Image (spheres, grey):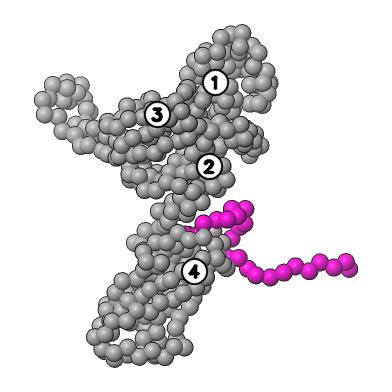
Amino acid sequence: MSEDIAIKVENVSKTFKLPHEKNSSIKSTVVNFYKRNKSFEIQKALENITFEVKEGEFFGIVGRNGGGKSTLLKMLAGIYEPSSGSIQVNGKLTPFIELGVGFNPELTGRENVFLNGALLGFDRKEMNKMYKDIVKFAELERFMDQKLKNYSSGMQVRLAFSIAIRARSDVLLIDEVLAVGDISFQKKCIDYFKQLKKSQQTIILVSHDMATVEKYCDRALLIHNGEFLDEGDPKEIAAKYRLLNLPSESGHKTKPHPSLFDDMELGEIIINGQQQAVVKEHQELHIEVSYTPRKRKRVITSISICNADGSHIAYYDNSKDRITAEKGKTYQATCVFNTDQFLGGVYVVDVDLYDENGVYLAKKPKAVSFSIMDSDPGKAGLLNIKGHWKVEEE
């Protein structure tokens, strides 16, 4: 492995055996234990994952729940062994996965600081030197002589986080710990990670917060259903992740009456040559609708742009074009528009075809979708409204 590579993952797969026997009594436990042919199914958590993380890189791993992110993180931490493939780590690695592991609820906060420090490899002299800083960062000066079982869950996590960040390591594995504690403490955590990024500490972050991924990560990996989907620019990966989280079409209430299809056969609908598109702000979108009329008709094609929950934002049709479609011939209606009025986010497109009398010929809800890469995550809303300000003294 090259010296500038901190972590190298090659063709890593992980499977688990899910047993089908249920042990509801002592008898069933004994019987199932001596069974020769035990029934189980194989669950593929990850399959053929390959990537590299360079030294000093802030690397993000994203994906939907159940996609394999945490399994991958635990394999990087050495908690799980890969079923196949290899993982190489250059240097010492510290996982921020389960904060507070090793805490004893019957001991005081002070005693748990020294216990946790010993687990991280510090001797008592070293812990004495950093004790005040740990307590100050956790904001728990008044509570250190109380037993840990009397701490709130937030207090315990704050103390665990304050201890964990003292660990000496070359690589940090972080699993959603930016959500630690209240807003004030979260800001301290974020400031800490800003310092790590400036010092070029190698960090691997697993998160569902795309704003955090876009802001801090140098590169990101997208995994879906245990498989490698894409790797590269965090803004593009975040946009693709948002497309994966679109609501299912089954929840859409629009359902055409079967008779509306008698005079029309609706063909393929694509956006920029595919079903889903990831675009930058101000980039053109081409929506192509293919259809074949069974009768000679004037066909009007329309698109409705909606946000992810189906609320309509914009509408556009070609009613002014006066196109008469001949029976049996296939036509392609293409709508071209610029995304400069849309802010970053996920959008879906409903496609409707109707005749000159307003009778619907075909409807395709959520026909295609697109995600706009956010150039400024700080902006709120969906539309980039054009205008100007004028301020005068009264």
Residue at (52% x, 23% y) in the render = 169
Q: In which quarter of the image is the N terminus?
A: top left
Residue 383 magenta-highlighted: yes
Judging by the rendered image, the residue that carries numbered circle 2 is: 217
Residue 175 visible to the viewer: no
- Is 287 located above or below residue 197 in the figure? below
Frontmost of labels 4 and 3 is 3
Residue under label 4: 284
> Majority secondary structure of the magenta segment?
loop
Of labels 3 and 2, earlier in sequence is: 3
Crowding near the residue tagged with mark 2, few <14, some 14–19, many ≥20 C-alpha atoms within 10 Å: many
**Circle 3 residue:** 1
**Of callouts 1 and 3, the N-terminal one:** 3
Horizontal placement of 160 versus 266: left or right?
Answer: right
Amino acid at dot 2: Cys
Which numbered disc, 3 or 2, marks the residue closer to the eye? 3
Mark 1, residue position? 168
Dot 2 lies on which element? loop
Report the span colored magenta.
371-394
